[in-house]
Image: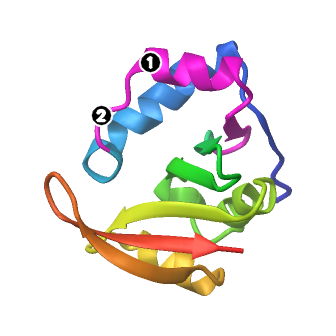
Amino acid sequence: MNFLVRLANLEDINRIKLLADKHRKELGFIIRSALVDSVNHNRLLVEDCSGAFCNFRKRKDNVTVIYEICVPAEFRNMGIGKLFIANIEKPIQLKCPVDNESNLFYNKLGFVLIRKETGKKRELNVWRLG
């Protein structure tokens, strides 16, 4: 199966919001207006077949921070997450709960664990690539 990652548009918001809400435990609560803002500033990627998405922002220090990356379970291990990472300017940094299986994904892609932080609800790994 060929997957295509592209910038999301406003028509994608409902589908992305449904997926985000389904994965609230992993992602936290994502408000619709934040997704709209990300679309309006070209900071939200989507993959059409799966509905997977990646929300990111480039900081003033030129580090791109991934805020959310979500691939539905039935589409995992098919390269969609890797496509998102390939389409985001490096260096990339993100935080991931220490008990989240995504840590294995980031490690496999070459991200380096730079530190652990205390989060609001649980400990977080801080990963960096590039």
Percent coordinates x, y for residue 100 in the rendering = 33, 69
Q: Nearer the viewer, residue 40 or 64?
A: 64
Residue name at image x 32 percent, y 53 percent: 26
Residue type highlighted by circle 2: Phe
Looking at the image, what colour scheme do you see?
rainbow
Residue drawn at point x = 67 percent, y = 14 percent: 11
User: Badge 1: few (under 14), some or many (20 or more) residues near its Cα, within 10 Å?
Assistant: some
Q: Is residue 123 above or below residue 37?
A: below
Answer above or below: position of 78 versus 31. below
Amino acid identity at mark 1 = Arg
Q: Which mark is residue 29?
A: 2
Is disc 2 placed on a helix, strand or loop?
loop
The answer to whether residue 114 is above or below residue 83 is below
Image position, residue 13 (x, y; %): 57, 20
Q: For residue 41: magenta?
A: yes
State which region is magenta.
Answer: 28-50
Q: CA distance from mark 2 to mark 1?
A: 10 Å
Q: Residues within 10 Å of mark 2 (few under 14, many from 20)?
A: few
What residue is shown at x 72% (from left), y 20% (from top)?
A: 9
Query: Is residue 68 a member of the stretch shown in magenta?
Result: no
Residue 22's x, y, as percent?
A: 35, 39
Front one among 92 and 84: 92
Q: Which residue was labeled with disc 1? A: 32
SS type, badge 1: helix
To which quarter of the image does residue 23 belong?
Answer: top left
On the rendered structure, is 39 left or right of 96?
right
Q: Residue furthest front?
A: 61
Q: Position of residue 117 (x, y in %)?
A: 27, 69
